[in-house]
Image (cartoon, grey):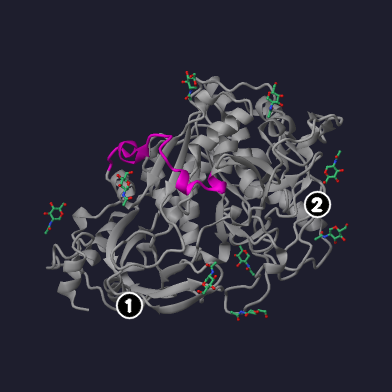
Amino acid sequence: MDHTLACFLLLLYLTFCASASPRSTSRKFHSYSTKEEVNSPPGWHPVGQAPPEHVLQMRIYLVQPDFSVLEQALYQVSDPRHQKYGRHLSKRQVDALVAPAPESVETLDDWLSSHGFNTSSLPRSSAGDWISISIPVFKAEEMLRTTYYIWENEVNNATLIRTTSYSLPSNLHPHVDVIQPTTSFASTTRQGSTLRVEVIPASSPPIDRPPLYTQSGLEVRPSCNTSINILCLKQIYNAVGYQASEKSGNKIGITGYLNELPGPEDLKEAFVAQNLSTTNATYNFVSLNESAIFSAAEGVVASILAALAAGSNQAAQTGIEANLDVQYAFGLANPAPATFWATAGSPPFIPDTEFPSNSNEPYADWLAFILEQEDIPEVISTSYGDNEQTVPLSYATRVCNSFAQLGARGVSVIFSSGDGGVGDGISDPTEQKCFTNDGTNTTRFMPGFPATCPFVTAVGGTVQIPEVAAALSGGGFSDYFARPSYQDSVVSAYLAALPPGTYEGLFNSTGRAIPDVAAQAVNYEVVYQGSTIGVSGTSAASPAFAGIISLVNDARLSKGMSSLGFLNPLIYASPSAFNDIISGHNPGCGTPGFNASVGWDPVTGLGTPDLQKLQSAFA
Ligand SMILES: *[C@@H]1O[C@H](CO)[C@@H](O)[C@H](O)[C@H]1NC(C)=O
Ligand SMILES: *[C@@H]1O[C@H](CO)[C@@H](O)[C@H](O)[C@H]1NC(C)=O
Ligand SMILES: *[C@@H]1O[C@H](CO)[C@@H](O)[C@H](O)[C@H]1NC(C)=O
Ligand SMILES: *[C@@H]1O[C@H](CO)[C@@H](O)[C@H](O)[C@H]1NC(C)=O
Ligand SMILES: *[C@@H]1O[C@H](CO)[C@@H](O)[C@H](O)[C@H]1NC(C)=O
Ligand SMILES: *[C@@H]1O[C@H](CO)[C@@H](O)[C@H](O)[C@H]1NC(C)=O
Ligand SMILES: *[C@@H]1O[C@H](CO)[C@@H](O)[C@H](O)[C@H]1NC(C)=O
Ligand SMILES: *[C@@H]1O[C@H](CO)[C@@H](O)[C@H](O)[C@H]1NC(C)=O
Ligand SMILES: *[C@@H]1O[C@H](CO)[C@@H](O)[C@H](O)[C@H]1NC(C)=O
């Protein structure tokens, strides 16, 4: 490829063409060695070499030498027994704790300069812990001594431009943590890609059956046994009659990916159907693309750039997942001001030589944006995930550590635990592929990431009144993250009670265990393009749980207390605020999965929330 021609073609995207004469430097960048190597991911195969001029939006993440200090601070402000409980850190404090060493910045800048990049014009995070470059494939291949291929997914035909290994000059290794897109084959599937959808008859028969009772004795409408709406959730989770304040300052947010947007008219209709006032059936819609993210990184007020008025015509892209998430999270938290972030990316995408979008990693994009914000909603729910093994350990760790930053700032980060039981997220267990990607191709349970990140709260699923575990409920043990101390005693107790040799070799008993908690996950009434449909999945459980936590925050903020922030140390210290789910199991990978049982279990965690108990304990 002719370099000059490439520069001409890509003038818009390239910064390195502008300063072609490398800055003189005493550092030498040769003697490359491999930085990371992964096995070919199952389900993906290379279909050809990547177009040399295709532009990658690449982020280079520098090592965060003080991360352990941040982690310690996170646990102090999140542990109700600690005197610093609730004294969350500011953005500035968190930025300082994730900042790279000056020498790391200098070494990376020298290397980039030696390749012609104008380092003073590259977007960086305010903490300085990542730098973003627009780089054509041929240049990335030269700098990383690698070859990029177009990979195609066998199931959904999505394509990615990735490599299975890359190298760096040896003197950069101690400074650079992660570079992506390189080796990550995460494809960000919505848990709801397996959502079961059925049309609910418009007029249900009159309700003359006797009421049902939850295990803690709360009265629930009989229809809630088979079909869930907001009133059902309020009844089951003891939230009837709690009126959230309009003045508490409490906020809630939902993240969306895959170009799936909520329908504003559907939200209004859902509020009407749920007897909620429609005056607050609105939300801030924030569309994130590269330019909005980079502007945020440069300190421009992102809301000016990125927030579009709610109610714009989004009908064409209205998605079931997005509708489900906003109707339940925003409905339960109502009237808390609500935000929906739509992060760019709409697979299957066809690699294009001109447009740089879609080449990056969606969680990283959203995190890059949100961490630049001063004011972040206190509760954020996400119903998307990937098989943990499709995300390289280095990158999963970096993304997970970013969730710790949110927790330290007082944000509860909530993820659905997955819809495949112990299997790979595909809800039909016969379709599941439970094979390791480590070269041995052995059968293994497939936990989902980011649910396995110890700094997020993972929500599994239940069904019926009284509640039992939903078979789809994603649960199990991380192969990446060690078991955090907050869950050590309950998880050890569960493991000790398993028959000896249970599922030996199928899971790592010392890994972070999921889920942490659960909520109803089957047959939610969702308004979608004007009709009511029934939707199932932990996709539903996560926004429902988030909505209940938002009400606890509302009570706390109304009393001048802090938000709850990172929930796990608190909830594992307070199991009695949850309804323990003791029956059902989560089959997958050709096994019956784990059993729900007394105490914590890898199907429903500690159980489902009880708002009054949570509020009397914490607000
Ligand atoms: C590098 O970028 C800075 C900031 O955008 C700009 O002022 C400077 O002129 C650029 N230098 C070159 C050599 O292009
Ligand atoms: C993927 O491509 C194949 C061959 O073109 C086609 O038969 C199949 O329907 C596609 N699958 C999806 C999910 O689009
Ligand atoms: C609730 O639903 C389950 C599963 O369909 C059913 O077995 C049970 O009888 C129902 N309970 C009542 C009281 O209708
Ligand atoms: C809404 O209110 C009406 C009238 O009180 C009642 O019949 C209906 O069941 C309520 N709907 C829900 C979802 O609570
Ligand atoms: C909710 O609606 C009421 C009445 O229109 C309005 O005063 C209030 O500001 C709204 N609250 C939010 C959070 O939008
Ligand atoms: C990116 O987002 C900004 C702010 O929302 C918008 O003005 C711009 O048109 C978007 N660009 C693309 C390519 O979608
Ligand atoms: C792994 O093993 C399974 C079952 O034996 C087989 O179907 C699959 O093709 C194998 N995958 C690889 C990558 O070898
Ligand atoms: C199990 O998990 C721990 C902690 O994450 C890890 O150190 C260890 O290598 C894992 N063992 C296996 C066999 O995967
Ligand atoms: C689940 O419970 C069944 C019935 O009691 C028992 O046979 C099975 O061994 C249990 N499985 C696990 C993984 O504990």
Residue occupying the point 78% across, 31% down: 221
Compared with 283, 344 (above or below) is: below
Q: Position of residue 524 (x, y in %)?
A: 67, 42
Mark 2 surroundings: few (<14), some (14-19) or many (≥20) residues within 10 A = many
Considering the image in quadrants, where does the C terminus appear? top right
Q: Quadrant of ligand 7?
A: bottom right
Q: Which residues are magenta?
A: 299-322
Going from N to C along the chain, the mark reached first, 2 or 1, is 1
Residue holding disc 1: 145
Q: Position of residue 81 (x, y in %)?
A: 62, 34
The image's mark for residue 175 is none
Considering the image in quadrants, where does the N terminus appear? bottom left
**Type of amino acid under label 2:** Gly
Q: Is residue 6 left or right of residue 44?
A: left
Specify whether tag 1 is near ligand 7 (CB below 8 Å). Answer: no
- Dot 2: what SS? loop
- Residue occupying the far right of the picture: 210
Seen from the viewer's position, the closer of residues 120 and 300 is 300
The residue mark sitting in front, 2 or 1, is: 2
Q: Position of residue 320 (x, y in %)?
A: 57, 47
Q: Position of residue 525 (x, y in %)?
A: 66, 40
**Type of amino acid under label 1:** Arg
The image's mark for residue 584 is 2
Asked if residue 73 shows in the view, the reply is no
